[in-house]
Image (spheres, coloured by chain):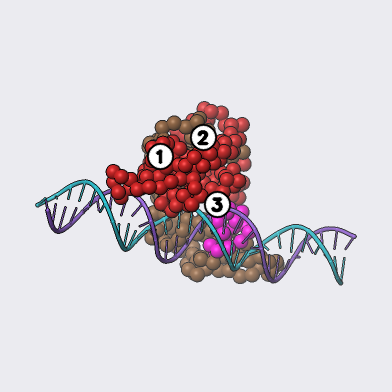
Chain colours: A red, B brown, C cyan, D purple
Amino acid sequence: MKIEEAIQQKKFRDEYHKAHINVLFTASWIHQQSLKALKPFNISWQQFNILRILRGMYPEPASVKSLTERMIDKMSNASRLVEKLKQKGLVERRSCKFDRRQVDVVITDQGLELLSQASAAMEDQMDLSKSQLSEEQAAQLNDLLDAMRY
Amino acid sequence: MKIEEAIQQKKFRDEYHKAHINVLFTASWIHQQSLKALKPFNISWQQFNILRILRGMYPEPASVKSLTERMIDKMSNASRLVEKLKQKGLVERRSCKFDRRQVDVVITDQGLELLSQASAAMEDQMDLSKSQLSEEQAAQLNDLLDAMRY
DNA sequence: AAACAATCATTGTATATACATGCATTTTCT
DNA sequence: AGAAAATGCATGTATATACAATGATTGTTT
């Protein structure tokens, strides 16, 4: 569905304006799809994102700062998200011995287990785009998005 | 800056996976730019969005439902956003005489005035993409995003 | 017309986001 | 070494989001 119909707006100032709106709308759409996929696992998209980063570094720990740097939404509060994950037993947190200001965050076995199921669900969601775009088109989309961010 | 550097992730499963992340990241980036532009006007991006929709319909009123349908993020609570805007004197709200379940929301003169300044600021932000993408590329980006959403 | 279902908006609750502030620890400067 | 600045994290506050529930009004069915 074209963006014009999706938000019932007939005209845009130009293609740049439309692209801005379109990126925001598509992100919101992806976010909703993700929520559906993650629903059975009782974690938010941001929590999923943190778990993925931690799996990427496993078994090395990550500091809260390094999590923030790697998160897609830099503004979400990694500190509080880690706390939520800890309450669920999905991560562990201990103070870093080399720099006591830092905190070492590590994903637990339970976290790894949940993540493997959750990412399977997310990948199934993502794969639905495959019938819409060729891999070359997806690559082209990536190039355009990268270029858009001045 | 390529997405790989932006979130310090070297590899992705495939271009589809990367595109998903890239859309979300770019939307977050746009959102931050928008926040900067809107800061002097003390309105959130969602409030700005509602004002724009109301201007588009002016002098016709919009129901809360029609606002939700036209909003970029359908899940944000239009009812509460309208209440915020009313408190600031930027919109008026009266019950619809044809259907008393509905509410007629109309942008005020003050709202129109603020919006004209705020949208100028937003357009200045958006125009910075012009040095990064040609209009054809922006159009291509729109086509790919439209296609991505199955 | 009366009963039932559907629609529209609001409100309550839990969580997330934006941003500022505070506190402990480490680094830098003199 | 001691003072000052910077860094890393946590927390407080206001706002926003996700989703369910409520209440009022309108539409539909028989």
Q: Secondary structure at mark 3?
A: loop
Front-most of A61 and B14? A61
The residue carrying mark 2 is B17
> Given this view, does label 3 or label 1 mark the residue nearer the observer?
1
> Badge 1 sits on which subunit?
B
The residue carrying mark 3 is B73
Residue occupying the point 44% across, 52% down = A83
> Given this view, does label 2 or label 3 mark the residue nearer the observer?
2
Amino acid found under the numbered disc labelled 3: Asp
Amino acid found under the numbered disc labelled 2: His
* Magenta stretch in the rendered image: B64-82
The residue carrying mark 1 is B7
Q: How many marks?
A: 3
Distance in Å between CA atoms under marks 1 and 2: 14 Å
> Badge 2 sits on which subunit?
B
Q: State yes or no: residue B74 in magenta.
A: yes
